[in-house]
Amino acid sequence: MSNVSLCHVNSVFVICILLFVFVKPNEAYSVKDFGARPDGRSDSTQAFKKAWAWACGSVKPVTLDVPYGRFMVRPMYFSGPCRNRIKLRMKGTIIGPSDYRVLARSSVWLMFYRVNRLTIDGGTLDARGQSFWACRRHFGYCYSGAQSISFVGCNNVVVRGLKSMNSQKSHMSLKSCNNIALTYLTLRAPSGSPNTDGINIQHSNRILIYGSVIKTGDDCIALGPGSRNTIIKRIACGPGHGISIGSMGNTLREDGVQNIIVSNVVFSKTTTGVRIKAWARRTNSFVRNITFRNIVMYNVYYPIIIDQKYCPHNQCPHQNSGVKISNVRYTNIRGTSRRKEAMQFICSPSTPCTGIQLQHIRLTFGNKPAVSTCSYARGTTRGVVYPRSCL
Ligand SMILES: *[C@@H]1O[C@H](CO)[C@@H](O)[C@H](O)[C@H]1NC(C)=O
């Protein structure tokens, strides 16, 4: 840096120190320094691209600020690998373009690709998905629709206190990532908005989702093939479709799901609570070592369900599901069911579920008795289990 040589001159030395300490102490810039405009209208995409290029190319750790205001950004890549740690410090809101088709033509709005050592702190994303959902309701074909924020091939990422509103499709997705902490998120879309999953995870290892509120139109959290060593804790889910493992059995050869803990979750008026779903198709896939514990359900349609004949739109393979489901523990789950069948284990005749453990379950159906139904499910029961176990 040229300031360094300047500092050899004694008289300017003090000023130099002051400049270093107070002006750019840890290499922080704002997206406004690169031309972004917080007026909710100007296109700030190029400014964000320049800002990312600076941050990603910096040899030193950097902070990139997104200050108060509304920044309109089109679909863009935040590509890595970068040269050092990056912190995205967000106070403002990033909004999608007013023409929904600009996002809908791309499958992802904000794509973090092969980025390591990133922290995203605070901020709001508003994809403004309303006209996209309206199009889907009325016309059918409206382009693919975009997920709001996606991490692909990323490692060591923390996303803390981010809000996402009105995503066109999923709010957030992780694919092929390791060591990711998603904490204190608020994800919101109306209950009737189609396919607005909260968080979608695939082929990822060591993921923590903690302390978050998810109100949306589809699954609050969906763990797909290849999800491993994941902890989901202290979540409020609803409205939405609950927390799902699956859909599994999409293909003949598929990575399974294993070592998952879902705990301290409240489901309010969701369609399902804790669900494992698989297509009725031949496959080598599996789901094993899963724990669901300390869960409260308020008016949930399917509080506890394993469904190996998953068939949402009647276009289904109609084979026996090959997904091997084993060692699934349900512990301390209570609350109210909206259907009589509060617990259902619909497993596969060719590949029965094994090692299902029920402990301290208390699910009621108004004043009427709740029941459990099983097919091809094996396991054990301990403590009070109501409805009575069919295992
Ligand atoms: C089951 O999963 C938990 C949570 O990820 C993990 O700590 C434990 O070691 C796993 N057990 C087995 C037998 O793999």
Image: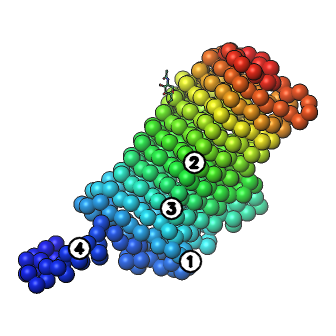
Residue 267 spot, x, y in % from top left? 71, 43
Mark 4 and mark 1 in contact? Answer it, CB < 8 Å: no
Q: In this view, does 173 lie to the left or right of 318?
A: left
* Residue situated in front as seen by the camera: 15 or 168: 15
Dot 4 or dot 3, earlier in sequence: 4
Task: Look at mark 3 in the image and give the residue it sits on.
Answer: 122
Q: Which mark is residue 20?
A: 4
- Asked if residue 229 is positioned above or below residue 174 in the image, the reply reads above
Mark 3 beta carbon near ligand 1 (under 8 Å): no
Measured in 3D between alpha carbons, the distance from the residue under mark 3 to the one under mark 2, in whole angstroms, is: 14 Å
Amino acid type, callout 2: Gly
Which residue has dot 2 on it? 211
Q: Distance between the residues labelled 4 and 1?
A: 34 Å
**Residue visible at 41% across and 56% down in the picture:** 119
The CA span between labels 4 and 3 is 27 Å
Label 3 amino acid? Gly
Which residue has dot 1 on it? 40
Q: Quadrant of the C terminus?
A: top right
- 52 to the left or right of 352: left
Estimate how packed mark 4 is, as few (under 14), some (14 to 19) or many (20 or more) residues with alpha carbons within 10 Å: some
Mark 1 or 2 closer to N-term? 1
The answer to which of marks 2 and 4 sits earlier in the sequence is: 4
Query: Is 141 placed left or right of 31 in the picture?
Result: right
Badge 3 marks a residue whose secondary structure is strand
